[in-house]
Each structure stands twice: as structure tokens, then as C-alpha cells.
Image (cartoon, helix red, strand yellow):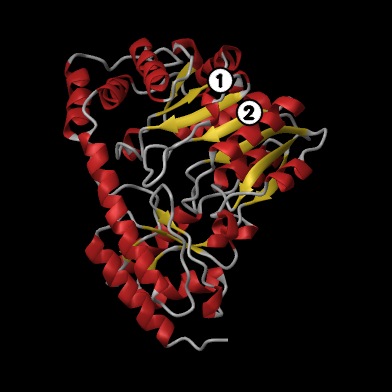
Amino acid sequence: MQYSNRITKLGTEGAFAVLAKAKAMEAEGHSIIHLQIGEPDFDTPDNISEAGMKALRDGETHYSPSGGVPAARKAVAEYYCSERQMDIGPHNVIIMPGAKPVIYTALCATINEGDEVIIPNPGYPTYESVVNYLGAKPVFVNLLEKKDFRFEVEELKSLITPKTRMIVINSPENPTGGMLTREDLEAIHELADKHDLWILTDEIYSRIVYDEKFQSVGAIPGAMERTIIVDGMSKTYAMTGWRLGYGIMPKKLADYLFTMAVNNFSGTCTFAQYALIEALTGPQGAVHKMVAEFKRRRAVIVDGLNKINGITCLNPVGAFYVFPNITGTGLTSEKFADIMLEEAGVACLAGTCFGSAGQGYVRFSYANSVENIKEALDRIWKVLAGVKQV
């Protein structure tokens, strides 16, 4: 049988591969502490779930318009106008079944074979995977520990060629927890404007920020003419299984994505979109409580990792990941992650799951209880104490 040549260019996510292995070990009786998956360990707030159930009872179970329920698109637009001081309307918004379809369709609608797309390294693997799938070339800008996992503007400038079509950013960032500054964003906008480039900004962690204020490139005057904002409900509202994402972009591009939706999934789950409306317009107390708990956990895991010989760990600004430097252990990222799972029963991800610049690092998600995080730290310390240092 014949298969598409492009299908072999698609990658996968290490988190799901490690999760499968960890679950298999649990089935065999092993005790595993899960610090590998990027999913809040909280339930969806009750008011949001109730809004979804009410919509079900009210018969909102039929096809949704391909771009989303008008009231949901309006809620997203009004939220961004209020919270980010952006001048957008419902015509700039498209609702999709998760943030990933927004990334995928936006790249499909803007990138041609042979184009170049600048993406962060280390970075969320879907960016590189889809760029490769489209026959374009991923060009990596390195996020540097010495810059709190931000990039050098001069390096970014040097990567732009006549073939460059887009700069992808993710702030706060997966896997590092780093966040771009206003100055970084202004530099990106200036370069994109000068070279006529798209900016795709993945802001899925924008509400999970601790000690600094989140900044969006979309709020820079004139930026929305060439900016695609990717966001969704999964992280902020603990709604990973609801599959609700949205994109904000120029109307012409949104219209193209509507057509792609028609040809792909028709529309997003109708009753779920009423839960989205409640999430954005209803009480935010559950979000604030969740972020405060993540901040408490962050302090525990950062302090604990920095007490372990051979590991140093920066304090992440946002998201719910730490990206410690483990070069002092004498282990590669892959070996460290394997040992932690197989000998310590602690599931984490090798930094190289996120690109070549992740070598020497691992990602721990602190979307787990303080008690489990402390137990994981104790297991890591005990196992590393028995590993010969080089």
C-alpha cells in the first residue's frame, strides 16, 4: 500500500511516550510519581462544568458554526480587549477543538514548501513537527539559561533570510518556564514588520504567571496586522479533556482557517463552547487559587533541586515546569530521564524532547501535590547518590 511521503515527517511528543511507559510500569506494580505530563492536576471549576451541562440540557448538541458559536467568539474578543487592551472583534477569533489545531491550521495557511520558520530551541515539539510536515525548514533560535531562557536579539536577526516567513514564540515557555520581556517582544515586532513576517505567539500559559506581568506581542500597536495568537482553556481552567482552543488573527487569515475547519472537523463541540463563555466571563477565583498553589509547589521543587548535587535550577517565571541543568551529574539528558523512571520511579522528560538545545537539561512538571514532589526529590537524591559522578 502507498503512504504519503510527508507523513514520516511528523514527530510526536515525548510526554505521551513517557506517560505510556510509566503507566505500563505502574501496571506491573511499580510506584511512579508523574512529573512528566503538562496537565493541571485540578478539576475543571464547578461553575464551568455546570455551564457545559446546562448547555447540554438546553439542547446545544448540534453543529456549531465552523468558526465557533458567535457568543463564544464575542466572549474571547471582549476578554482580550479588556485584559490586553487590544482592538479586535469576533471576526478576528476562531474557536477550535484545542490549541493544537490552531497552530496546525495557521501554519498550513501561511507557510509554503521551502519557506523558513524560526522557532525556539528548546521548544514545544509541535512547532518543528508541523513545519517539517509542510516541507518547510525549521530554523532554531536558542533560548539561553544565562538569559533566563530568552534568546539573544542579535542571533534572531542573524537567522532571518529572504526565505523566512514566520517567527514562532511561546511565552511563558514550555519547557523552560521562561518569559519574554516587553523589549524582546518589541524587537520581534520590529523585525517582523521590517521583513514582512508573520508572528505566531503561543500564549497558552499566559494566565499562569507568578511574579511578573504577562506581556503579549499582540498588544504592541500595529502588531495584530501580522500576529496569530494561540490560546485555549486547557491550562488556565484545567480543561484539557474539553478540547477547547482559539486563535486571534487578521480577519482574512481567520476566514481561511474557517474554510480549513469546514474541510477538517466541521466545527468545535457546541455545548463545550458555552463552558468557554462561562470560563472567560465568570468568577476567576479558582484560577487564582490554582496559580497560588502552583507558586507554592514551584518554591518546593526549585529549592529541593538546587540542594541535590550536580543539579542547578532557575526559578521559572510562568507555566508549571522547571528545566534544571543536570550537567553536573555527568549524565546526558536521556540517561538521566531513563534512570529517574526506572530506578527512582520518577517520570520526567529529557530536555532533548524539546530540541538539541535541551541537552544537559530535563523537564519536571510540578502539576502534582507538594507531598509527591517532596517524595520525588527524595528519590532523585537517593538514586543520584548511588550514581558514579564523572
Q: Are marks 2 and 1 in contact (CB under 8 Å)?
A: yes
Q: Is residue 148 above or below residue 235?
A: below
Q: Quadrant of the C terminus?
A: bottom right
Query: At 66% across and 45% down in the image, what residue appears?
Result: 9
Find the distance from the CA under tag 2 to the CA under tag 1: 9 Å
Which residue sits at x=18%, y=29%? 47
Q: Give the position of the N terminus as an image quadrant.
A: top right
Residue 309: x and y in percent read 45, 80
- Write the residue at 30% across / 36% down: 237
Residue pointed to by mark 2: 108
Q: Does dot 1 land on a helix, a strand or a loop?
A: helix
At which x and y percent is residue 321?
41, 54
Q: Is residue 315 visible?
A: yes
> Residue 260 got which mark?
1
Q: How many marks?
A: 2
Label 1 sits on what residue type?
Met
Q: Residue furthest right?
A: 162
